[in-house]
Amino acid sequence: MFREMRRKKQEVSKQECIEILKTEKRGVFAVLGDNGYPYAVPMNFYYDEQEHKIYLHSAKSGHKLDSIQSCKKICFTTWNQGVKKQDDWAFYVTSVVIMGKAELVHDEKLKMQQVRNLGLKYYPSEQEVEEVIKKYISNMQLIAISIDNMTGKLVHEK
């Protein structure tokens, strides 16, 4: 169903992909947008390893949500900061590309739990997370991405 990676020698393990999903802060969420054009937007995210799902937050209306409601298939991409090897000016960067399906989360308990997890990834304290949740939760939509396919690739940017 999904294409195999063409450059197999650059493929990284699923575990390395998971580590990147757990540690990196931003990714690009892409949907099939208006008039068949792709719509891709950088977003903060939280990866729940136990559920093997990615969670994003959004406003309760807009382009992303309209697109998800008309086509649940999405692509999500993230990458690490890269490393340089001694005596080399170019970075080695690992990217993760996910194909999956997005759904809007309506379960309030799950929404609170995952929004809290998302906030704890970014905010310096639990207190700040709780303050932000209290202020904005009523205007927030949580999106869950079920992962159908995940590949990772190490690239030397040279």
Image (cartoon, rainbow, N blue to C red):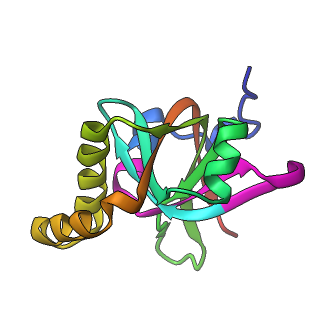
Outermost top residue: 1
Q: Position of residue 150 (x, y in %)?
A: 56, 35
Q: Residue at x 74, y 57 (%)?
A: 39
Residue 12 painted magenta: no
Q: Is residue 1 left or right of residue 149?
A: right
150 or 137, nearer to the observer: 137
Q: Position of residue 136 (x, y in %)?
A: 32, 66
Q: Position of residue 80 (x, y in %)?
A: 47, 61
Outermost right residue: 35
Q: Which residues are magenta?
A: 20-40
Q: Is residue 36 visible?
A: yes
Q: Residue at x 25, y 51 (%)?
A: 117
84 or 65, nearer to the observer: 65
Q: Residue at x 59, y 48 (%)?
A: 76
Outermost left residue: 127
Which image quarter is the C terminus in? bottom right
Q: Is residue 19 visible?
A: no
| The quarter of the displayed image where residue 93 is located | bottom right
Residue 36 painted magenta: yes
Q: Residue at x 57, y 57 (%)?
A: 61
Q: Position of residue 67 (x, y in %)?
A: 70, 47
Q: Is residue 46 left or right of residue 87?
A: left
Give the answer, above or below, for where 17 lies relative to 2. Answer: below
Q: Is residue 48 left or right of residue 70?
A: left
Count the labels in the image: 0
Which image quarter is the N terminus in? top right
